[in-house]
Every structure is written in structure tokens, then in C-alpha cells.
Amino acid sequence: MRKEIHPNYVECKVTCACNNEFTIKSNKETMSIDICNECHPFFTGSEKILDAAGRVEKFKSKYKLS
């Protein structure tokens, strides 16, 4: 490995718009994000499937899903 070409990884404090905070490793010391796993609809279970012309039911019946 060549020296002095790789970024310096440090502990990064990430703050979400929902006030959730966690730490990761990054080349920045702080980050501000709009959405995280605590407020994203997919992870919270509040997602809504928009069905256009029965496509979801057609897919489920095609692959015999519940």
C-alpha cells in the first residue's frame, strides 16, 4: 500500500432530522442526514403501497404469494 493517499477515518457523529444520533466511521467528523432507519417508512412499518391498476395483486397471484 502506498502511504499518504488514503483518507483518515475518524468517528463520525450522524444526526438525523428526527433527532436520532449514532456514530459511524467516516472521513468527516459530523454528518446531518434527512432520513434514517428510525424514521424511514420501510423500517417503521408505516409504508403504503400505491397500487396502480391491480399490479400488486397481479404480481402476488403470478408468483403465488399471500
Image (cartoon, rainbow, N blue to C red):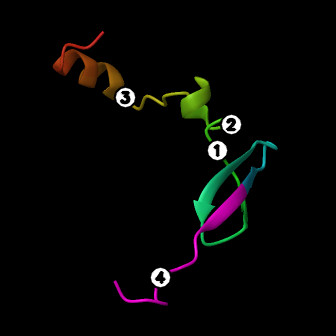
Q: Earlier in the sequence, mark 1 or mark 3?
A: 1
The residue singled out by tag 1 in the image is: 36
Task: Kindly check if marks 2 and 4 are in contact, taking CB atoms under 8 A apart as contact.
Answer: no
Judge left or right: residue 60 versus residue 25. left
**Foreground: disc 4 or disc 1:** 4
Q: Earlier in the sequence, mark 3 or mark 2?
A: 2
| Amino acid type assigned to the residue bearing label 3 in the image | Ala
- The secondary structure that most of the magenta stretch takes on is loop
Judge left or right: residue 2 versus residue 24. left
> Toward the viewer: 9 or 13?
9
Q: Which mark is residue 39?
A: 2
Task: Kindly check if marks 2 and 1 are in contact, taking CB atoms under 8 A apart as contact.
Answer: yes
Q: Earlier in the sequence, mark 3 or mark 4?
A: 4
**Foreground: disc 1 or disc 3:** 1
**Foreground: disc 3 or disc 2:** 2
Neighbourhood count class around disc 4 (C-alpha, 10 Å): few under 14, some 14–19, many 20 upward: few
Q: Tag 4's secondary structure?
A: loop
The residue depicted at 18 percent of the width and 20 percent of the height is 63
Judge left or right: residue 7 versus residue 36. left
Neighbourhood count class around disc 1 (C-alpha, 10 Å): few under 14, some 14–19, many 20 upward: some
Q: Tag 1's secondary structure?
A: loop
The residue depicted at 34 percent of the width and 83 percent of the height is 1
**Foreground: disc 3 or disc 4:** 4
- How far apart marks 4 and 1 lie (CA) works out to 28 Å
Tell me which corner region of the image, top left, top right, bottom left or bottom right, holds residue 47: top right
- How far apart marks 2 and 1 lie (CA) works out to 6 Å
- How far apart marks 3 and 4 lie (CA) works out to 51 Å
